[in-house]
Image (cartoon, rainbow, N blue to C red):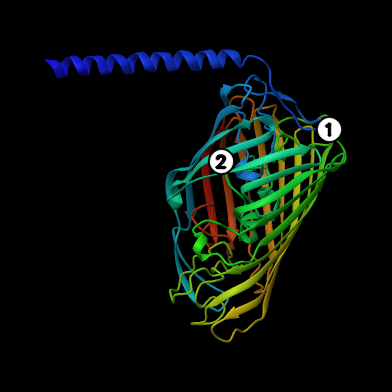
Amino acid sequence: MHEMIIKHIHIKTIFILTISLLSLLNHLFAQNDTPVLDTQVNGTVMIKRGLINNDSAYTNYASGEFTPGRGFDLVRTKFGTLNISIYAMARYLNQMPGTQTWEDHLGRPHDLTGRNDFYWHRSMIWFSGWLGTPKFTYTATVWTVFTTQQTLIYGNMQYKVNKHLRFGLGVGPNLSVRSMQGSFPFYSSTDRTMGEDALRGGFTHGFWITGEVVPKLYYNVMFGNNLSTLGIQASKLTRNIAKSASIWWMPTTGEFGPRGGIGDLENHDKLATRFGFSYVNSREDRFNNIGTPSPDNTQIRMTDGVLFFETGALADNVTIDNATYNMFSIDAGFKIRGFNLQAEFYGRKLSKFAADGPLPVSELNDFGYSLQVNKMILPKKLILYGVHSYFFDEFKRHPWEVGGGINLYPLKNRSWRLNGQVMHVYKTAAGGTFGLYTAGQTGTTITFGSDILL
């Protein structure tokens, strides 16, 4: 009897605390009716955080995957704020033919089984806000990719001195291709194209500075641990620092739409333009020198799809332990009245090899380009697009892709998208279950997906 009374009191206490918490949150949400503006300079859309209904105009104050959506304010006080936002994507993917054999640049055969599956592919939950002063912002991110069985919690802290100078510390992108610099997830498809994915660097822990040089001209400089932090423990890192920089100019309207993403869902009345140049340098390590064939460093692939640090990549039974990675890219984009043209040219050099045996080459030089064309068919509702990529590579295999798809926006904004795409690829240079392609694949890839950004 005594235990029943205690249990009853315990349940009643929990109930009262729950009601009190819900009442507090309701009070906090009611206080958030006061408009709080997130802005970008030079004519970009000003939004009332959490209150706007007409479109998803997200201010890009981080980069790539690390910029939260508009989200919902949970707490807003004089001491600081807390906001929660979510990105999620699910899709069906079919790589055809289902079985095939391809040869790498040394003529060695590899068996390939194409994917045919449904996946809740990626989820991201951002907790963000400012602390003490709106100049000091923080973001903590819960990130998971189901297809690779990876789950991480990471983030960044940034301090904005003025519009010309902002400091950041945490996880950020190596500033290689355009898609790494803020446009996520506003791609043509639900993931990067083969051309964008094949040569790029990844995300790592680092320090960066960014800002506006003069009106309409911006810069970003990043110093990081390596090309990609995924799967690399601190105990395995070398003392080498990856260095990257990007500069971009938006001479006409001073903006390029939400996040600078692909597609002109916003239907620009005036021509919006963006021109950029980026460069990355990093001395890379295999990060696994204990005699196993598979390296921990899986960011770098050669254009035949083989992992660069894999044993036998350039010569049978020879393992490369270190190499220098250099990459540049030049991009240009145009948007007007629902039409968007995006072009990018890039080059990558791998050199200064340190290996445990003789190699047939001392460096690899690969170049390529990507073209993306988007056209809005139904205002704020339907966009058709085409994609083409091509490589002028060291091995003269010339991987390429061509195809296109459709994007449907049921809410007439970028918060919810339905995507369908058909892409034909030839000797795919990109690979892995993170993206849309399997290394070495020749054939057709079909995807149907849906993603949301709140």
**Residue contact between numbered discs 1 and 2, judged by CB atoms under 8 Å:** no
- Whole-Å distance between the Cαs marked 1 and 2? 35 Å
Helix, strand, or loop for circle 2? strand
Q: Quadrant of residue 174?
A: bottom right
Q: Residue at x 44, y 44 (%)?
A: 119
The disc, 1 or 2, on the residue closer to the chain's N-terminal end is 1
Helix, strand, or loop for circle 1? loop
| Image position, residue 324 (x, y; %) | 66, 71
| Image position, residue 181 (x, y; %) | 69, 47
| Image position, residue 281 (x, y; %) | 70, 64
Is the N terminus in the top left, top right, bottom left or bottom right quadrant? top left
Q: Residue at x 69, y 21 (%)?
A: 36
- The reply to whether residue 232 is in sight is no
Q: Which residue is mark 2?
A: 420
Q: Is residue 295 above or below residue 62?
A: below
- The amino acid type of the residue labelled 2 equals Gly
Name the mark on residue 252. none
Is the C terminus in the top left, top right, bottom left or bottom right quadrant? top right
| Image position, residue 204 (x, y; %) | 59, 54
On the picture, is 149 further left or further right than 169? left
Q: Is residue 376 above or below residue 435?
A: above
- The reply to whether residue 40 is in sight is yes
Q: Residue at x 76, y 28 (%)?
A: 45
Mark 1 closeness class: few <14, some 14–19, many ≥20 residues within 10 Å: few
On the picture, is 101 further left or further right than 325? left
State the residue lying farthest toward the bottom: 358
**How many dots with numbers?**
2
Can you tell which of label 1 and label 2 is closer to the viewer? 1
- The amino acid type of the residue labelled 1 equals Asn
Name the mark on residue 42. 1
